Image (cartoon, rainbow, N blue to C red):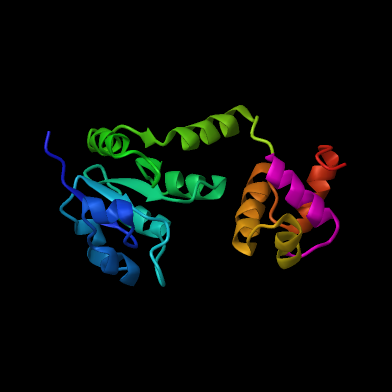
Amino acid sequence: MQVHATILGRPSPVTRALGHGAGSAAERGDARLGELLADVVLMDLQLGAGIDGVEATRRIASPDVHVLVLTTYDTDAGITRAIEAAAAGYLLKAERPEELFAAIRAAAQGRTALSAPVAGRVMDRMRGTAGPSLTDRDILGQLARGLGNREIARALFISEATVKTHLGRIYAKLGVDTRAGAVAVAKEQRLLP
């Protein structure tokens, strides 16, 4: 089987190895994205200013063009948004090349392809067993103390961006969209001491 693939997103070691293309069209939100001559499009979630990878996926995905998200972000929110936008799969850039190529071939055949950690997260979520991780619990504890992102980052010796990533995961896992809501649900579920 011969598969034609196009990669949309910022250059990375993976995309440079595979051949990076059409990224600027995605960043501009170019209407011609839906006319790509590719069986499979590898889509980064972070495209730069303008359109994001989920919106580009929504515009490109069709019965003839399968979009595989290829990213470093494995947040529940990112996975959910990509799948809802008709992505054929969700892969992490840490994948071994042979796994990546197998996923591309699977997508070209209309099958779903998920990285093992992503598949685990999806299964946990479907089973309702996805609970906050240890770091999530640490962040919840700091939230309960009323600390902001910068103070939480300092207290836990992590970056502010990492705090924001965990907050997104916490919100998704607890089904809330505010800090106060996260603390309230965490207390209800006895996730806080």
Look at the image and tell me whether residue 98 can be seen: yes
Residue drawn at x 30%, y 32% as measured from the top left: 111
Give the magenta range. Answer: 132-148
Residue drawn at x 62%, y 48% as measured from the top left: 169
Q: Nearer the viewer, residue 106 or 56?
A: 106
Q: Nearer the viewer, residue 50 or 157?
A: 157
Please tell me how many numbered marks the rendered image carries: 0
Residue drawn at x 27%, y 47% as measured from the top left: 62
Query: Split into 4 quadrants, where in the image is the N terminus?
Result: top left
Queried whether the magenta region covers residue 142, the answer comes back as yes
Query: Farthest front residue?
Result: 157
Look at the image and tell me whether residue 174 can be seen: no
Position of residue 118 measured from the top left corner of the image (x, y, whole percent) = 48, 37
Q: Is residue 33 above or below residue 128?
A: below
In the image, taking residue 124 as reference, residue 35 lies left or right, namely: left
Queried whether the magenta region covers residue 109, the answer comes back as no
Query: Split into 4 quadrants, where in the image is the C terminus?
Result: top right
